[in-house]
Amino acid sequence: MRPTLRLLSAPLAPSNLLARNTLALLPPIPLYRRILRAHRQCLPPAGRALGDHYVKDEWRRHRDIENPLHIIEFLTEWQVYAQHLEGDTWRGEKLDKAKLEKMSDDQIGQLYELMRKARNMDDDEN
């Protein structure tokens, strides 16, 4: 992921893709650290391990992305995730159908695997 300073410092445009509660995107490294810090503060140990592994893997996969739209969308979604996690509004939240329809078959498979691991973790705790 090679964002330019111009992309990172510009405030978000009010479009359907980028309309969020934030004014500007965090740069990638501070956002990555913020997510891991939120996991440390807001998740139980088993959830933190699963979440940290998923975040690290996902950020590694997107390291070499050069398309500015993909970079902005990636950072925006992770910033929204961090805000939900810190605000504790993530519990019981359902995935938006529009987002699900945009996903590729690989992304849906990855989401299914994540759901399966999370459910197994819940079963182990109970």
Image: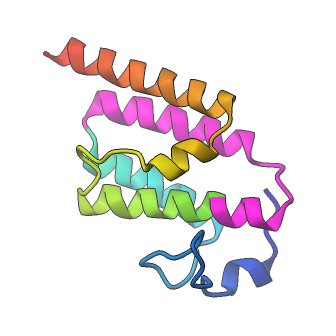
Vertical relation: 87 (above or below) 38: below
Vertical relation: 22 (above or below) 124: below
**Residue 28 percent coordinates (x, y):** 64, 63
Q: Nearer the viewer, residue 25 or 29?
A: 25
Q: Nearer the viewer, residue 41 or 103?
A: 103
Q: Nearer the viewer, residue 105 or 48?
A: 105
Q: In the visual, does 47 lie left or right of 30?
A: left
Query: What residue sits 54% from the left and 59% below the top?
Result: 77
**Residue 86 percent coordinates (x, y):** 30, 60
The residues colored magenta run 44-73
Query: What residue sits 42% from the left and 78% below the top?
Result: 21
- On-image quarter of the C terminus: top left
Query: What residue sits 63% from the left and 47% below the top?
Result: 102
**Residue 52 percent coordinates (x, y):** 47, 38
Query: What residue sits 60% from the left and 69% below the top?
Result: 17
| Magenta-drawn stretch contains 59 | yes
